[in-house]
Amino acid sequence: MKVLALGGPGAMGRVAVRVATGLPGIREIVVADRDSHAAARLAHELGGSGVRMSSCKVDVTDEAELDAALSEADIVVNTVGPYYRFGLGVLRAAIRARTHYIDICDDWEPTLEMLDLDADARAAGVRAVVGMGASPGISNLLAARAVARLDAVTDLYTAWPVDVPGAGADDTDLRGPDGRPIAAAVHWMQQIRGTVAVVSNGEIVQEQPLRPVALTLPGGRKGTAYTVGHPEPVTLQRSYRLTGDAANLMVITPGTVAYLDVLRSDMDSGRLTNETAAADLAKPTMRRAVRAALRAVRFSTPGSLPPFFAAATGTRDGRPLTVLAHLVSTGGLMKNMSEATGIPAAAGLAQLLDGTVVRPGVHPPEAAIDPDRFFADLAELAKPITVMIEEAP
């Protein structure tokens, strides 16, 4: 198959393309970006991989360029963010071109809009998976593993690490080579401002982000994590018909969540935009650091919560049960944000390539990706990866 890697030269796209060169079933990878020189450089770097590599210029805001590139591809891997700006347009173009689709969309707003294109994708015979990264992505499939142990699900929380000890991730450079904030940082600011989607009493509602959620989990683990606007609550509620609460959480230290809270306040008041807040996060200012230090006492610690997990509460055989699915070894996966996102994107792509994702339509990871196969593939791509499942009444 011929794969179009949109945004391939970006930090996360580069990892996804690198890993994809080792996947069976790929005849050619076309690296596409608005920076044609960066696309050509990456194609040249990976030219000895055994897969034919080429490149082209594509600005995803130029409909003619986008349509032309998609019309020549069997599958598009879309790593162009932030997705609240670009995700919906690229998926619409893929459906027009009848090109199968996978992305790492981590914004809840466009996720809902893209899921609403399900009927259009089915009519075009297009198989599309949205949100196949770390969170969402790995988190959704950990949730699938936990939910499989229950007859009915009430509450479902997913969580990912920011700066906690034991997470295994290095600090990620939040600025690109040009000195500007990367798309992931701009996205992060979007999802800690205003209101974000969570599930309350089985309904999708919006509330202020950075809300503390205190959890007691199997294995005696307990602590507090903080809400952020990732898509998992809206997709998991659709997939599993939750009757209780769900949210996506950051496992984060008090000092860091306090700084995010300062940025949130300044964005909500209009003093900062997503871009200027992301720039401030990459290079914190003394004044905001002082404000954050004064606020830090308001925030609780993550305690003994695992860094990357899904926790489902419900019933089995009529009895209450909580199931925790978490990563206990992460190999090279959590080295940085790029690896944590790009590697699972390639593992998801493998299931599009071989037809494991068989149904046309627009799907979140938990509705299309085989979780057992995914974690087995992930363990090969980022050795060693181990998922532990624990239960408690």
Image (cartoon, rainbow, N blue to C red):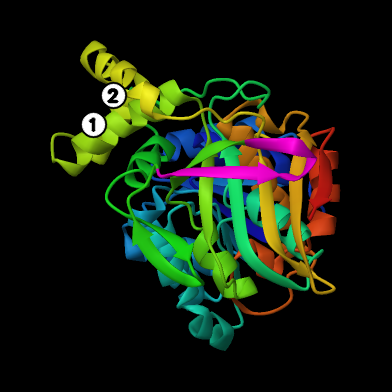
Stretch in magenta: 211-222
Please, what is the three-letter code of the amino acid marked with disc 2? Asp
Tags 1 and 2 touching, CB below 8 Å: yes
x, y (%) of residue 350? 75, 56
Q: Which residue is mark 1?
A: 276
User: Which of the two residues, 267 or 71, is positioned nearer the viewer here?
Assistant: 267
* 86 is within the stretch colored magenta: no
Asked whether residue 175 is in view, the answer is yes
User: Which of the two residues, 164 or 111, is positioned nearer the viewer here?
Assistant: 164
Crowd rating for badge 2 (residues with CA inside 10 Å; few <14, some 14–19, many 20+): some
x, y (%) of residue 190? 33, 46
Tag 1 secondary structure: helix
What is the CA distance from the residue labelled 1 to the residue labelled 2?
A: 6 Å
> Which numbered dot is residue 62?
none
Quarter-wise, where is residue 101 in the image?
Answer: bottom right
User: Which of the two residues, 257 or 177, is positioned nearer the viewer here?
Assistant: 257
x, y (%) of residue 283? 33, 17
